[in-house]
Image (cartoon, helix red, strand yellow):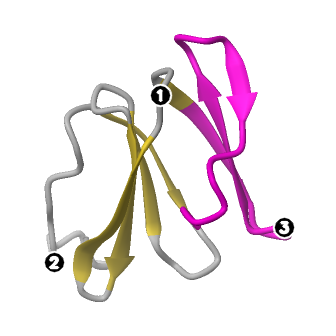
Amino acid sequence: FDTGGKLVQQTRAGDGATKVLVDQRERFVVIDTRGGEILIFSTDPLFLRQHHPVGGSPYGAAYDDRRDVLWLTLTATNELTLPSARVM
């Protein structure tokens, strides 16, 4: 949406997106819990750039922009984890 509330771009984001974050490169980082993936979208244009499978049902997420690190909670294994460095 633009600042006036008009829809500008849209896209599908996985099978069950639960969280969306923005990283320091202004990309959308989508946590797809049902699909078991992290999806990374560029914003201009809105386009899926990366998808990374994650076991354990990823759900909660936090992005540390000082360290450029994505933290994930995995509900199936009751863990807090850092995905592979190649994701970000």
From the viewer's perspective, is the residue at label 1 or at label 2 nearer?
A: 1
Residue under numbered circle 2: 8
Residue 75 lies in the magenta stretch = yes
Q: Amino acid at mark 1?
A: Gly
Direction from residue 82 to residue 47 in the image, left or right: left
> Gap in Å between the C-alphas at discs 1 and 2?
33 Å
Give the residue at x 47% y 37%. Answer: 54
Q: Which residue is mark 1?
A: 55
Q: Within 10 Å of the Cα at label 2, are there few (<14), some (14-19), or many (20+) other Cα atoms?
A: few
Look at label 2 and name its amino acid: Val
Residue at horizontal 28 percent and vertical 32 percent from the top: 35
The magenta span reads 60-88
Q: Residue 27, percent across and down?
A: 46, 73
Q: Position of residue 61 (x, y in %)?
A: 61, 40
Q: Give coordinates of residue 30: x percent, y percent.
A: 41, 51
Q: Residue at the bottom extreme?
A: 44
Which type of secondary structure does the marked residue at label 2 adopt? loop
